[in-house]
Image (spheres, grey):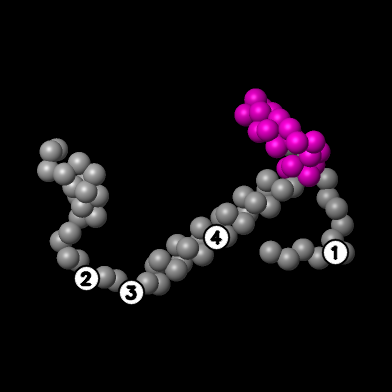
Amino acid sequence: MCYSRHMAAETITIRTNPALDRALEILTADGTNRSAAITAAVVEAAQRRERAAAMRRAVLQMPRVPNTGVSIADEIIRERYGDER
């Protein structure tokens, strides 16, 4: 994500609620001001969404593996618990 240095700063108003107040307490506990904490949180959330979308696209572009009839979930359970289920 690239931001222009020439972009004018825009003020954003948000309504808080108990969950947001708690999150801000956590994000500002180290002395970070609220504006910087909110900015960092929004940017990090956007980056996570971009990475998740890129991973979904990559998975969808992978070649399909033929169905072997093997259930990965069953194999994991068998490894963890043996045949005692």
Instruction: Inspect the image, locate mark 2, and give the three-letter code of the amino acid beneath it.
Output: Pro
- Say left or right for 28 vs 59: right
Gap in angstroms between the C-alphas marked 4 and 3: 20 Å
Task: Please report contact status of discs 4 and 1: CB closer than 8 Å, yes or no.
Answer: no
Task: Please report contact status of discs 4 and 3: CB closer than 8 Å, yes or no.
Answer: no
Q: Is residue 7 above or below residue 85?
A: below
Magenta segment: 17-38
Q: Does the stretch in magenta take in 9?
A: no
Q: Is residue 38 above or below residue 8?
A: above
Instruction: Inspect the image, locate mark 4, and give the three-letter code of the amino acid beneath it.
Output: Arg
User: How many C-alpha atoms fall within 10 Å of the one at disc 2: few (<14), some, or many (≥20)?
Assistant: few
Residue occupied by mark 2: 66
Prevailing secondary structure of the magenta residues:
helix
Gap in angstroms between the C-alphas marked 4 and 2: 27 Å
Q: Residue farthest to the left?
A: 83
Q: Quadrant of the N terminus?
A: bottom right
Q: Does the stretch in magenta take in 31?
A: yes
Name the residue: 40% across, 66% down.
59
Residue occupied by mark 4: 51
Figure quadrant of residue 50: bottom right
Gap in angstroms between the C-alphas marked 1 and 3: 42 Å
User: How many C-alpha atoms fall within 10 Å of the one at disc 3: few (<14), some, or many (≥20)?
Assistant: few
Name the residue: 83% across, 45% down.
11
Residue occupied by mark 1: 5
- Say left or right for 60 vs 83: right
Instruction: Inspect the image, locate mark 3, and give the three-letter code of the amino acid beneath it.
Output: Pro
The picture places residue 42, in percent across and down from the top left corner, at: 68, 48
Task: Please report contact status of discs 2 and 3: CB closer than 8 Å, yes or no.
Answer: no
Residue occupied by mark 3: 63
